[in-house]
Image (tube, rainbow, N blue to C red):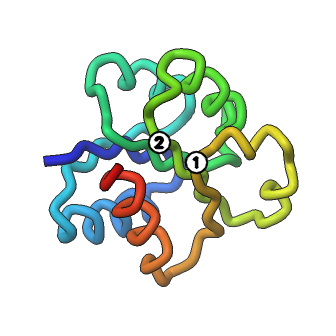
Amino acid sequence: MKKILLVDDEESIHLLYRDELEEEGYEVHSALNGEEALEKLGILSPDLIILDINMPGMNGIEALRRIKEINSEIPVILCSAYQEFKQDLASWASDEYIVKSSNLDELKAAVKKHLAK
């Protein structure tokens, strides 16, 4: 079973994404911020990371940079409510950028694509 690390500071996002992704057959682990994600990275060895950008403490862009320094092979999907971050050059280090929505088809398709590699 493929492991996904979901990093977001909103509990409602964790509940929604966890339900949808577990229904697709993935094992989903949670982190509430960038620092927690980095701690769990070594412990869990996730196959993919879904990462919010706007979080307290270490934001998603900084977490992305540090994750890629630790293991550049792990696909990271940035998932943000703010489309303007897509223009930020730092976000280009991600493997995919998705704007949050209640329709998770785009996210699920991106997860499937990156885990099939």
52 or 91, which is in the foreground? 91
Q: Eyeballing the image, is 3 above or below 14?
A: above
Residue type at the position of mark 2 = Pro
Residue at x-position 70% and y-position 29% = 62
Q: Eyeballing the image, is 53 above or below 45?
A: below
Give the residue furthest to the bottom: 103
6 or 93, which is in the foreground? 93
Q: Eyeballing the image, is 72 above or below 114?
A: above
Instruction: Mark 2: give few (<14), some (14-19) or many (20+) Cα within 10 Å.
Output: many
Where residue 39 appears, as percent x and y from the top left, is 41, 19
| 97 relative position to 35: left or right | right
Residue at x-position 62% and y-position 29% = 63
Residue 75 numbered tag: 2
Q: Eyeballing the image, is 78 above or below 61?
A: below
Mark with earlier residue (2, 1): 2
Residue 95 numbered tag: 1
Instruction: Mark 1: give few (<14), some (14-19) or many (20+) Cα within 10 Å.
Output: some
| 87 relative position to 95: left or right | right
Label 2 to label 1: alpha-carbon separation: 6 Å
75 or 40, which is in the foreground? 75
Where residue 68 appears, as percent x and y from the top left, is 57, 25
Q: Quadrant location of residue 30?
A: top left
Q: Secondary structure at mark 2?
A: loop
Residue type at the position of mark 1 = Asp
Residue at x-position 68% and y-position 66% = 81
Q: Could you tell me if the residues under marks 2 and 1 are in contact, i.e. CB atoms within 8 Å?
A: yes
Where residue 103 appears, as percent x and y from the top left, is 48, 83
100 or 15, which is in the foreground? 100
Q: Quadrant location of residue 15?
A: bottom left
Q: Secondary structure at mark 1?
A: loop
